[in-house]
Image (cartoon, rainbow, N blue to C red):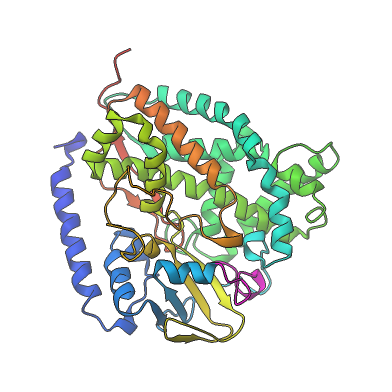
Amino acid sequence: MADGGFDLAQSRREKAERDAAARERAFSIPIEQIDVTDPELWINDTHWPYFERLRKEAPIHRCETNEEVGPYWSVTRFDDIMAIDTNHQVFSSDAHLGGITLRDFDDDFILPMFIAMDPPKHDVQRKTVSPVVSPASLMQLEPIIRERAAGLLDSLPVGETFDWVDRISIELTTQMLATLFDFPFHDRRKLTRWSDVATAPLGMGIIDTEDQRRAELLECLEYFTGLWNERVNAPPTNNLISLLAHGESTKDMSPMEYLGNLVLLIVGGNDTTRNTMTGSVLALNQNPEQYDKLRANPALIPSMVSETIRWQTPLAHMRRTALVDHEIGGQTIRKGDKVAMWYVSGNRDETAIENPDAYIIDRERPRHHMSFGFGIHRCVGNRLAEMQLRVVWEEILKRFPTIEVVSEPKRVPSSFVKGYESLMVRIPAKNPA
C-alpha cells in the first residue's frame, strides 16, 4: 500500500485487465474499423495491440471511419515508415497541403513552418536555426542545464508525494526553451501553455474550440513579435529569435510563417523532452531490474536515454500528403491522400528491433529507433534532447537511491503528442552525503 492509501498492486491488476480487454477487441473487430487515432486508446495506453495487428495483417492500412480528420492511411512497419519519411518527392510535408498532423489547418489559418515545408525552402530555414544546437552551443548549454537540474532536484521534498511532470519535466524543459529563445524567464510558463494549445485535441481539458486555439496562438504571435522587433534592431546573437530575425531566408517571413516556426520550435523543444523525461521515471519503475542495472552502472545513462526515447516515442506519428499516386506494400496511395507514419508502431516492429516491447537499457544498438524521424526532417534538436536527459539522470543518481511512482500516470488524450499530464511520485530518501 503506497502513499495516501493508493494500492499499486491493485492498479497494476486493473491495467492488466484493461490491456487484456483491449487486446481481445483489437484482434476481433473487422480490421477496416480500426482507427488508431481514438483518444481513448492513448488515455488508457491501450493502442499497442491495434498496432500489432496492423503490422501483422495490414501494414499499409486505410481508415475510412474518422469523421474529424477524414480518410487516412496508417503506415506501421519500420522499413515502410523510413521509405516514406525519406521520399519527400512523393510524400509532402507542405502546410498548404495539410502539414504534419492528420488534422488539416483551416484555410484561413495555415501555419507554414520548416518541418511543414519541402525542399528547397525547408533546407534553408532549418539551416538558419541550427546554430543554436551546434556542438559548440551544446557545450555552452550543458553547465546551464546541470546547474538548473541540480537546483530543482535539491528542492524536491523527501517522503512526500508530488507531480514529477510539473515539478521537473515541465519546469526543466521550459527553462531550457526560454534560454534558447532568450525569452523573459518570468513568463516562461506561457511557452508551456502555447505548446499545449497548439497540439491539444478539442474538448479534452486544454481548449474547447478552434477559435480558442486561434486566439491563444495569436497572443503567442503578438508576444513574440515584440521580441522580434527588439532583436532585429540589435546585433545578431545565438538565440532562436535573433537567428530568425537576421537570417536571409527568414527575415522577411510573413507573420503566419513566423508563428508557424514558433509553434514548431516550442512544441519540438518542449513536449518531446518533457514527456521522455517523465517516461524515463515510469519505465524504470515498471522495469525495476533495469533501474537496478542503472544504479549499479551509471555509465549506462546515455544508452538508457536512447532506449527511453524509443520506448516512449514522444511524437506518435507524423503526417505526409501524397503528391502522386504511389504503390507501397501492395496498396496504392492516391494523390492527395493523407498518410500517417506511426513512429510509435515502428519502434515496436519485431522485424526491425529485437524484443521491441521490452525496455532494455543496455541494448546493443540503443539509437536504432525512429523517434527523431529520418531524412531531411530528422529532429534538429535531437542531440540537445539527449543531453538534457543525460544530465538530469546524472544528477538524479547522485542524489536519490530511487524515485518511486505511486500511481498510474495521467496520459495526454492525443494520438500525436504521446505524453503525460501528471505522474505522482515519491522520493523515499536521499543518498548519504
Q: Quadrant of residue 124?
A: bottom right
Residue at x-position 58% and y-position 83%:
336
Q: Residue at x 67, y 66 (%)?
A: 117
The image quadrant where one finds the C terminus is: top left
Query: Residue most toward the right?
Result: 233
Q: In the rendered image, which quarter is residue 36 located in?
A: bottom left
Q: Measured from the top left, where is residue 4 in percent x and y?
A: 20, 36
Residue 262 drawn above or below residue 168 = below
Residue at 53%, 30% in the rendered image: 145
Task: Where is residue 234? Give x, y as percent.
Answer: 84, 37
Quadrant in which the N terminus is drawn:
top left
Q: Position of residue 99 (x, y in %)?
A: 60, 69
Vertical placement of 359 versus 184: above or below? below
Residue 99 part of the magenta segment: yes
Out of 344 and 71, give the one closest to the viewer: 344
Q: Is residue 156 magenta?
A: no
Camera-side residue: 177 or 184? 177
Q: Mostly what secondary structure, the magenta segment?
A: loop
Q: How many marks?
A: 0
Residue at the spot x=28%, y=26% of the render? 401
Q: With respect to residue 91, does 280 lie above or below?
A: above
In the picture as drawn, the residue positioned furthest to the top comes out as: 433
Q: Is residue 219 visible?
A: no
Q: Position of residue 3 (x, y in %)?
A: 21, 34
Tell me if 61 is positioned left or right of 212 in this view.
Answer: left
Q: Is residue 231 found left or right of 172 in the rendered image?
A: right
Q: Nearer the viewer, residue 423 or 399?
A: 399
Q: Which residues are magenta?
A: 86-100
